[in-house]
Image (cartoon, rainbow, N blue to C red):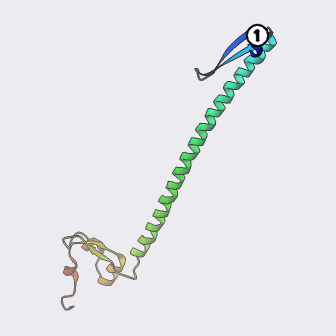
Amino acid sequence: MPGGRTPTALLISPISLNGVTHAVFRFAFSRRLESADQEFLSHASEALAVAMRSSKDRTLLVAQQAELLRTNLHLEEQMRILQQQKLELSLFNSANFSCIATDAKGVIQIFNVGAERMLGYAAEEVVNKITPADISDSQES
């Protein structure tokens, strides 16, 4: 105690949260503690434990909020990609132009609606079955 006096009463109070002691407070008093003082200190210790629990809960909520933000950003990016793919697919499936693609061996892998309409073949008839040479006009140069 200040001034070198020996305390009349000494109270050591652990502050526990979920059975784990996180802090220990040492109180020194210059007078003898009465029951009202002890009750007050008991309530103060409980309030401190609640405050620590609330602080821990807030920290957890902040972490969860950050995770939700990251997830939301990821989902927004996925949505943007899906919208772009939808646009590309609608253009690809347009009947206004033909699109035919082959693999390294020359076998047709892609045959869109425009190619079906312009050449008169269904995609199911040509994809993974024939080459463009098989459907080309032999009189074309």
Q: On the rendered structure, is 69 left or right of 98?
A: right
Residue 52, given in percent of the width and then of the height, sits at 65, 29
Instruction: Relative to 60, say whether 94 is above or below.
Output: below
Q: Quadrant of residue 6?
A: top right
Q: Which residue is mark 1?
A: 5
Which residue is drawn at the image coordinates 60% and 42% (left, top)? 62
Q: Secondary structure at mark 1?
A: loop
Residue 77, given in percent of the width and then of the height, sits at 49, 59
Mark 1: amino acid: Arg
Q: Nearer the viewer, residue 98 or 16?
A: 16
Which residue is drawn at the image coordinates 37% and 82% (left, top)? 97
Q: Nearer the viewer, residue 57 or 52?
A: 52
Q: Report the label total.
A: 1
Q: Nearer the viewer, residue 95 or 1?
A: 1
Residue 4, given in percent of the width and then of the height, sits at 74, 12
Residue 29, given in percent of the width and then of the height, sits at 76, 13
Instruction: Relative to 110, say whether 43 is above or below.
Output: above
Q: Nearer the viewer, residue 9 or 111?
A: 9
Instruction: Say which quadrant the C terminus sits in.
Output: bottom left
Q: On the rendered structure, is 68 left or right of 25?
A: left
Q: On the rendered structure, is 86 left or right of 38?
A: left
Instruction: Say which quadrant the N terminus sits in.
Output: top right
Instruction: Relative to 81, say whether 117 is above or below.
Output: below
Q: Quadrant of residue 85?
A: bottom left
Which residue is drawn at the image coordinates 52% and 50% (left, top)? 70
